[in-house]
Amino acid sequence: MAEALAASRYVYPLVNAAHILGLATLFGSILALDLRLLGAFSAIPARPLALVLPRVAASGLALAVLTGFLLFTVEPLDYAANTAFLSKVSLVGLGTAHAILVHRSTAWRAFVRDDAPIGRRLRSSAALSIALWTAAILAGRLIAF
């Protein structure tokens, strides 16, 4: 697969574009939900967003991980030695673990099940989420430099 990616004039750019699409889907949905949890867009009910956007984010994450792995196979030794790449992978892992923990929390379950108020814990988690995913994207941009 790595040879096909490296040899083709079109496959590598298409996989790279799909990776960017996955990142945009992931981050866009996370940012919209987290900003709403932090109090932005208060005219829009938060609960329906909380029911839909995590699934959209998970789809974006799946696409980004799959395409990211394919891109990694082209130059695995270079990427494995790249501090920015290692930071990005670590931050994606932390962001994913954070999301899983939040969605398993009592506060989240009460919010989506009972439409409970958005408490301090969910607001803090939203701020941390934005910070983690923003840092992951910034680290990803630094890979080429």
Image (cartoon, grey):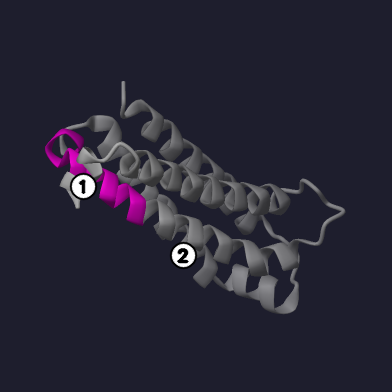
Q: Main secondary structure of the magenta part?
A: helix
Is 126 situated left or right of 18 in this image?
A: right
Viewer-closest of 77 and 30:
77
Q: Nearer the viewer, mark 2 or mark 1?
A: 1
| Viewer-proximal residue among 38 and 68 | 68
From the top left corner, tell me how far across and down residue 128 is, in percent.
53, 46
Q: Secondary structure at mark 2?
A: helix
Q: Which residue is rendered at x = 42% and y = 39% of the image?
A: 136
Question: Which segment is the magenta one?
Answer: 66-79
Q: Is residue 26 left or right of residue 12?
A: right
Numbered tag placed on residue 101 in the rendering = 2
Residue at 20 percent of width and 36 percent of height: 79
Q: CA distance from mark 2 to mark 1?
A: 38 Å
In x, y percent, where is residue 106?
57, 73
The residue under label 1 is 4
Tell me if residue 26 can be seen: yes
Indicate the secondary structure of the residue bearing disc 1.
Answer: helix
